[in-house]
Image (tube, helix red, strand yellow):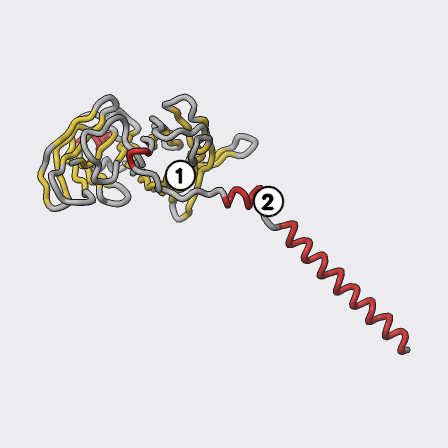
């Protein structure tokens, strides 16, 4: 009987040891691979380069209401590949789109679906999209860098003429905006071409699903007080507008164009 008890005890001990080994192995097998860990280590700090060295980006809504186009106008610091993570609120859920594109020929564009498609081609489109953040990583140059900023998506079913940015520091009101179904106001990380002055505010991209024409009243909050003006870029040149300045706020009548920033 004593010998039988010893055999049972040995069997139980072996079962425990084998079970522990299998559990440890399963945990090791389910842990991130070396490649995944390497990607995490390669994550870059965001918005560390100067504004003057940042590219001009735009997020353009499409007339179908199902896609946005990521538009890269220029690169002031060299890169060959742009990786992006477009996060956005859709109803109560946080959604995202991830991808990359080559930056060898500029300007470059990338169409992004606000939804998902199966391998069989069936697509589900996200509803009640509000916007979120855009993270872009620039690699292939001498010094990789990353930029992150906010974007706001507006499905203008009520034909509102007044709209604001996600940070509420950009507020615009124009009759033609009431005719635009989809609008994106984006805190673009950089500005195009040579800026007529020193940027003292966030840079805002205004894109619509239809042709943007007409005039509007625009208010922007700058980072500091002073002799402030609003610079507006129409795709080929800058125009500056003087306005009413109250502290860090400036309000002026402007043409509806693609980019705005406060300068001094």
Rendered-image quadrant of the C terminus: top left
Q: Residue at x 58, y 42 (%)?
A: 35
Q: Quick one: 201 or 49, which is closer to the camera? A: 49
Q: Is residue 22 visible?
A: yes
- Location of residue 221 in the rendering, given as x and y in whole percent from the top left corner: 18, 43
Q: Assess disc 2: are there few (<14), some (14-19) or many (≥20) residues with their C-alpha within 10 Å of its C-alpha.
A: few
Above or below, comparing residue 49 to residue 107 in the picture = below
Q: Quick one: 263 or 128, which is closer to the camera? A: 263
Q: Is residue 113 visible?
A: no
Q: Which quadrant holds residue 175?
A: top left
Q: Residue furthest left?
A: 244
Q: Which quadrant holds residue 22?
A: bottom right
- Location of residue 34 in the rendering, given as x and y in whole percent from the top left corner: 59, 44
Rendered-image quadrant of the N terminus: bottom right
Q: CA distance from mark 2 to mark 1?
A: 23 Å
Q: Are marks 2 and 1 in contact (CB under 8 Å)?
A: no
State which tag comes first along the sequence, 2 or 1.
Answer: 2
- Location of residue 248 in the rendering, given as x and y in whole percent from the top left corner: 15, 45
| Rendered image: mark on residue 202 | none
Residue that numbered label 1 is attached to: 146
Residue that numbered label 2 is attached to: 34
């Amino acid at each position: 009987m004593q010998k039988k008890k010893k055999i049972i005890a040995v069997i139980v001990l072996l079962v425990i040891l084998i079970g522990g080994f299998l559990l440890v192995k399963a945990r090791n097998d389910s842990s991130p691979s070396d490649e995944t860990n390497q990607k995490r280590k390669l994550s870059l700090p965001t918005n560390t380069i100067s504004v003057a060295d940042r590219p001009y980006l735009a997020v353009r809504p499409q007339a179908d209401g199902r896609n946005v186009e990521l538009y890269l106008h220029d690169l002031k610091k060299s890169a060959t590949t742009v990786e992006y993570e477009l996060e956005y609120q859709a109803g109560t859920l946080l959604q995202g789109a991830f991808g990359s594109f080559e930056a060898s020929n500029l300007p470059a564009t990338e169409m992004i679906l606000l939804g998902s498609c199966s391998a069989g081609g069936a697509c589900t489109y996200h509803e009640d999209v509000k916007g979120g953040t855009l993270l872009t990583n620039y690699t292939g140059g001498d010094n990789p860098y990353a930029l992150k900023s906010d974007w706001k998506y507006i499905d203008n079913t009520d034909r509102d003429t007044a709209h604001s940015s996600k940070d509420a520091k950009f507020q615009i009101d124009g009759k033609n905006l009431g005719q635009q179904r989809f609008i994106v106001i984006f805190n673009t990380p950089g500005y195009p071409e040579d800026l007529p002055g020193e940027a003292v505010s966030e840079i805002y991209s205004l894109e619509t699903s239809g042709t943007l024409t007409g005039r509007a009243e625009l208010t922007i909050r700058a980072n500091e007080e002073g002799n402030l003006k609003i610079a507006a870029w129409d795709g080929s040149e800058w125009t500056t507008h003087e306005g009413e300045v109250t502290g860090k706020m400036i309000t002026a009548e402007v043409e509806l164009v693609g980019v705005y920033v406060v300068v001094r």
